[in-house]
Structure formats: C-alpha cells, structure tokens
Image (cartoon, rainbow, N blue to C red):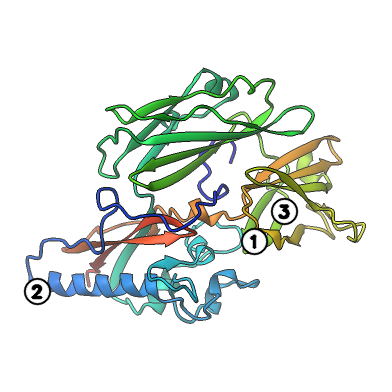
Amino acid sequence: MAGEAVDYLIGMVITGMVAVSAIIVVPNITYMSLLSVSQQQLRNIAMDTLKTMLLDAGYPYNWGSLPNFSNSSLQRFGLGLYGSNSFYVLDPNKVSRLILDNPTGHLGYDTVRDRLKLQGYGFNFRIIAPFNVTINGGQPVYVETLRSGVLVTVKYNSGGPICNADVKARILYIKNNRQFNWSTPPSTRTDVLGQCTIRAGSDFQDVEDFVAIFYVTVADLTSVNAIYNAGFTQRAAQASIIGANVTLWVPPVGSTETQSRRVIQTVHAITETDYILLFPRGDEDPNAGKFNAGTGYETWSYLFPELLYEDVLFLVFNIRLSLPGDTLVLFLAPRPNWLGARVEAYGDVTGTRGASTAVKVQRNVVISGMTYIAELTMWKEST
C-alpha cells in the first residue's frame, strides 16, 4: 500500500449533508439518445436496476456488516442505508463489498446479477467522486516532495480543468519519538489550468512517515484524497474495518518479519483536536494484543465502540515485532469505505464488447455525508 493513493484506508467526517451542484454532479438520471425500441427497453431496465441497487437495503438489511459475510448470505441485493430518512443514501459497509480486494470478503459479479435477475444482461457499475483530483501527477510523494511543494490538479470527470477550487491539506506525521504531529499548510485555490501547489509548513521537519489528506471543495462539494509517504513500508499488519470491529493479520511478505510475533502495544484514536488511548483499556487478557503467522493467534480482532460516535480521523497502532525487535506504526482510518466508496469498476470487465447496444445511467448518491456519482452501464449479451 505504501506510496499509493489509498482510497479505501483513509476517510474523513464531512458534517451535514453536502449540497448537490448540477454543474459538477450529473443531476438525477442521465439519458442517452434513443434510436430504437430495443434501446428504449434496455434503458428502462437499466434505470429500474440502478434504482433497485441504490434505494433497496437488500436482505438481510445489514448484509454488508455481517460478521460471517459470504455471497450465500445475500438473499436480495441493495446498497441502501437501512432506516435512512432520505433517498439515495448508501450503506458504506455494503459499498465496501464491491471492492474486489476487500480482505474481509466481497460480492461476486454473478451473485449480484443473479439477485437482480439480470440473466442475459451484462453490466458495469462505478461509484466515483463528483470531480477528479490528482496528487503529484499520480507519482509517488515523499517527505521532500511535500517540503518543496506537491502539485494538485482538479478536473471535471469529463476532463476539463476546474479553476478556483479550494484546496486544503492536513498532514499527520511521526518522528523517531513516535509522537503524532500535525502539519497544516496554507490553503490555496486552483488556477485556470485547475492546478495549485501545496507545501508542508516549517514544522514538517525530521519526519519519518506521514499520511497527507487533501480536501478539495468545488461549489460546496468536497472530495477527500489521501496518500502515504512513498518511502513508508507498511510491514506491521494488514487490516480491515467493518462497522466498529477492526481485524489485523500478518501481511504475506517473504521476510523474517512475516514470522515475527506481533504485540499491539497501544492504539490511539486521532480526532481533529486530540488523540485518545483506546487500547489497552486496562482489563484485557495478557494475550489480547498478540498475533502472528503461526499457530494460535493468526488474527487480531477488537471492537472499538468509539468509531460509532466519535469523529475519528485515524487509528494509529504501535505494533512491536519480536524480529527485528522494532516498533512499527500502522495508520488506519476508522471507515475505509468512505473513499473506498469510489468503486472504479465492478462487474463485467470486458465491458460492452460484442454488444450491439449499451446504455449508461447515473445518479447522485450520498455516502457518509459525501456526494458521489453512481453510474451503471448495461448491455444485452449476445446469444
């Protein structure tokens, strides 16, 4: 994960409902030009399917957060947030099941197509940000990159630049003393090319590792992007979060660290103004923080109720390895699906190949207070 934009491990609370701008987000349903009755029928099927996906909570209504999740546990498919008072509000745990590398399990394409009764049709589904943000041209970002200035480019999803977008950044970093520090560079706005430069503040010195968070606001819509230090090698653990339950396990890397016993020393919750000790609480079993790749403690799971009601930005784990005898830090966001909700390609990866007709429909959706575009492309499979 090091050095890559981490869409599904970093999240940020955006309070309140985000206002929808027709300039940025495709309003309601987008229709294609109809040339035939078959296209009309296909469009109607696509529209009805998209509404079902976005409005129905599915069954069980909490299928995305079931502790023993499997494809067979899903009886009816839907991404809607159960109990929501508004339409087109999605459950982030359900959306996370469409991310193919979700380590706690994802839904197979054939399962969804079966539950939606789409035999004979192919589809591709995406959930994307209302506009496109690129950090450093998509290239790795190092400590020195942030010191000298990192280029932020903001564009419409159609490709045109967005000028006057407000760009802010916050950087959580650690030094050798393992203390957590914030650097808050001055905010800026994009130029006519949709670009601006963010530079870390003078306090960004002697940094070992960091996570940089970029907030880009256009017409009252905010997109949040985050990156790790490209030189940061995350060897401590791999993790996933469903609801308030965190699960860690040993990453599959070929080194002595793979076999090393891990002991979680502390877990802190980082908020906008403070950091809170979540683990240990003082009454745990002596083995509560241990896990390794051998027999006995292959995974570590812990319930953090604070994730349900605190505005937590990150969880920071200090994990002690018996070999090489070092303490490593794991940055983890409490709700990986907030940005993991950007499902880039779910469904038939061959796309419309071989199909004579395809339609595309879109709808604004809200996930954890942030606005996205849900897009469904559908075609009738050749027989």
Picture layout, residue 331 above or below residue 144 = below
Q: Is residue 118 left or right of residue 341?
A: left
Q: CA distance from mark 2 to mark 1?
A: 51 Å
Q: Nearer the viewer, residue 327 or 380?
A: 327
Q: Which residue is mark 3?
A: 249
Residue 302 placement (x, y as % from top left): 75, 61
Counting residues from the start of the chain, the first of labels 3 and 2 encountered is 2
Amino acid tagged 3: Trp
Residue 159 has which mark?
A: none
Query: At numbered mark 3, what does the secondary structure look like: helix, strand or loop?
Result: strand
Distance in Å between CA atoms under marks 3 and 2: 53 Å
Residue that numbered label 2 is attached to: 37
In the image, farthest residue toward the right:
286
Q: Nearer the viewer, mark 2 or mark 1?
A: 1
Q: Position of residue 316 (x, y in %)?
A: 71, 44
Q: Nearer the viewer, residue 334 or 375?
A: 334
Left or right of 195, for residue 325: right
Mark 2 lies on a secondary structure that is: helix
Is the residue marked by circle 3 packed among few (<14), some (14-19), or many (20+) residues within 10 Å? some
Q: Is residue 288 above or below residue 129?
A: below
Q: Is residue 348 left or right of residue 381?
A: right
Quadrant in which residue 33 is drawn: bottom left
Query: Which label number is shown at residue 309?
Result: 1
Measured in 3D between alpha carbons, the distance from the residue under mark 3 to the one under mark 1, in whole angstroms, is: 26 Å
In the picture, which quadrant includes the C terminus? bottom left
The amino acid pointed to by label 2 is: Val
Dot 1, how many residues are within 10 Å of its Cα: few (below 14), some (14-19), or many (20+)? few
Tags 2 and 1 touching, CB below 8 Å: no
Compare marks 2 and 1 and give the one earlier in the sequence: 2
Q: Which kind of residue does numbered mark 1 sit on?
A: Tyr
